[in-house]
Image (cartoon, rainbow, N blue to C red):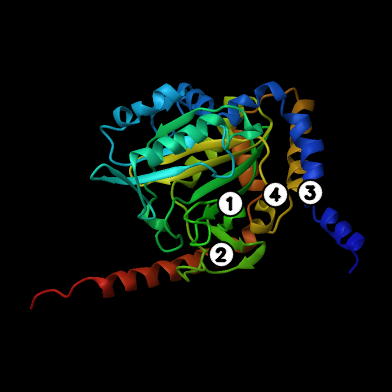
């Protein structure tokens, strides 16, 4: 098949390319003066807190070289924490501290970092080596998320996250991103994490994509990634829908996590979300965007210009439900849970006679 024929087939299926994303959606729906609200994680977090959206608590901010020495004071009541560049992208520059030992900081991989190592890293963040455009940056010190135990069978270290792409407050596609050994425990696809499609209506996982190839099982745990029921799914969908009002950006990706103790948390927002989510869901973004735009026009013709988040959510869950997959996914989910329960029983110590 020629490249032209392939392109025509993809267009026919409603698959979105990067040029179409930028021209028809990012430039059209995202006003540039609103970008700082999502490109700066500190501004995003502050705006979310004001709106009553749950986020990982912030311990402190380091804005200048003079403040680097204040890290020990910022984290004196916390043995574990996360250091992030405020304007970083792709997971670069993030250090996750799991514990402290004899004046050293232990990362989730077990590596020990000295105070000088941490200060050097903070200095690099402030200089802008991880920021968008290379501009001077700030360092954010925040709560370390502990992933829900449901992910233990399908994730390698790190924290899995959920991305939902939203158009004018209408959820289009959802994806669960799972860390692997190759990704170093980070949930970034370009670093080797897995992307798993999620049915918008039920929150049940679909097939996975890894290094742009379809997969059925996690390469490290070997457990199936398909058929897992994500808890609090309606909460995740509602949170993503509300982010349109939070930022005013019409086209964005909402990244969320499920913390063991705090439940669903919004991690960050992205005004230029990637397109691999289409592979994970075997569905085109352009086709779903057109469906939503028709609905917006239909409501506008009736004089309804601001439908409620609940109505937008209900429309997408009804319109984009992958009904043909739900039944088989539910059966598979039952099978996976049964096998996990069997493993748990076999691992438990025998009772005393």
The image shows residue 78 at horizontal and vertical percentages of: 28, 36
Circle 4 is placed at which residue position? Answer: 275
Cα gap from disc 4 to disc 1, whole angstroms: 11 Å
Q: Secondary structure at mark 3?
A: loop
* Residue 270 horizontal side relative to residue 83, left or right: right
Q: Residues within 10 Å of mark 1 (few under 14, many from 20)?
A: many
Q: Residue at the spot x=23%, y=45% of the render?
A: 102
Cα gap from disc 4 to disc 3, whole angstroms: 7 Å
Sequence order check, earlier mark of 4 and 1 = 1
Q: Residues within 10 Å of mark 3 (few under 14, many from 20)?
A: some
The image shows residue 293 at horizontal and vertical percentages of: 77, 36
Cα gap from disc 2 to disc 1, whole angstroms: 19 Å
Asked if the residue at tag 2 contacts the one at tag 4, i.e. Cβ–Cβ closer than 8 Å, the answer is: no
Asked if the residue at tag 3 contacts the one at tag 4, i.e. Cβ–Cβ closer than 8 Å, the answer is: yes
Sequence order check, earlier mark of 4 and 3 = 3
Q: Which mark is residue 327?
A: 2
Circle 1 is placed at which residue position? Answer: 175
Cα gap from disc 3 to disc 1, whole angstroms: 18 Å
Q: Residue at the spot x=64%, y=66% of the render?
A: 214
Sequence order check, earlier mark of 4 and 2 = 4
Q: Secondary structure at mark 1?
A: strand
Q: Which mark is residue 190?
A: none
Sequence order check, earlier mark of 3 and 1 = 3
Cα gap from disc 4 to disc 2, whole angstroms: 27 Å
Relative to residue 259, is residue 225 depicted above or below?
A: below
The quadrant in which the N terminus is found is bottom right
- Between marks 3 and 1 in the image, the one whose residue lies nearer the viewer: 3
Circle 3 is placed at which residue position? Answer: 17
Asked if residue 97 shows in the view, the reply is yes
Who is closer to the viewer here, 349 or 311? Answer: 349
Sequence order check, earlier mark of 2 and 3 = 3
């Amino acid at each position: 098949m020629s490249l032209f024929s392939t392109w025509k087939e993809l267009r026919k299926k409603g698959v979105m390319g990067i040029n179409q994303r930028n021209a028809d959606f990012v430039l059209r729906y995202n006003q540039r003066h609103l970008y700082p609200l999502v490109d700066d994680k500190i501004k995003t977090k502050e705006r979310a807190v004001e709106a009553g959206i749950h986020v990982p608590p912030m311990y402190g901010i380091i804005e200048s070289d003079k403040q680097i020495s204040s890290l020990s004071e910022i984290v004196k009541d916390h043995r574990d924490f996360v250091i992030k560049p405020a304007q970083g992208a792709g997971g670069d520059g993030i250090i996750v501290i799991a514990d402290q030992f004899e004046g050293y900081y232990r990362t989730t991989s077990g590596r020990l970092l000295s105070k000088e190592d941490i200060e050097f890293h903070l200095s690099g963040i402030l200089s802008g080596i991880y920021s968008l455009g290379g501009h001077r940056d700030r360092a954010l010190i925040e709560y370390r998320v502990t992933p829900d135990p449901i992910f233990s069978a399908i994730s390698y270290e790190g924290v899995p996250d959920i991305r939902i792409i939203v158009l004018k407050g209408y959820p289009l596609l959802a994806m669960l991103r799972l860390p692997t050994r190759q990704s170093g425990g980070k949930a970034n696809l370009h670093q080797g994490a897995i992307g798993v499609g999620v049915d918008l209506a039920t929150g049940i996982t679909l097939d996975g994509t890894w290094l742009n190839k379809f997969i059925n099982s996690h390469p490290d745990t070997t457990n199936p990634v398909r058929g897992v029921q994500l808890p609090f799914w309606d909460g995740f969908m509602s949170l993503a829908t509300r982010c349109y009002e939070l930022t005013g950006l019409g086209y964005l990706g909402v990244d969320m996590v499920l913390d063991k103790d705090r439940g669903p948390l919004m991690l960050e927002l992205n005004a230029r979300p990637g397109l691999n989510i289409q592979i994970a869901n075997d569905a085109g973004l352009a086709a779903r965007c057109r469906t939503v735009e028709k609905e917006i026009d239909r409501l506008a013709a009736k004089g309804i210009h601001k439908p409620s988040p609940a109505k937008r959510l209900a429309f997408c869950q009804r319109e984009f439900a992958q009904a043909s997959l739900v039944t088989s996914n539910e059966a598979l989910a039952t099978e996976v849970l049964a096998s996990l329960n069997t493993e748990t029983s076999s691992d438990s110590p025998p009772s005393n006679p």
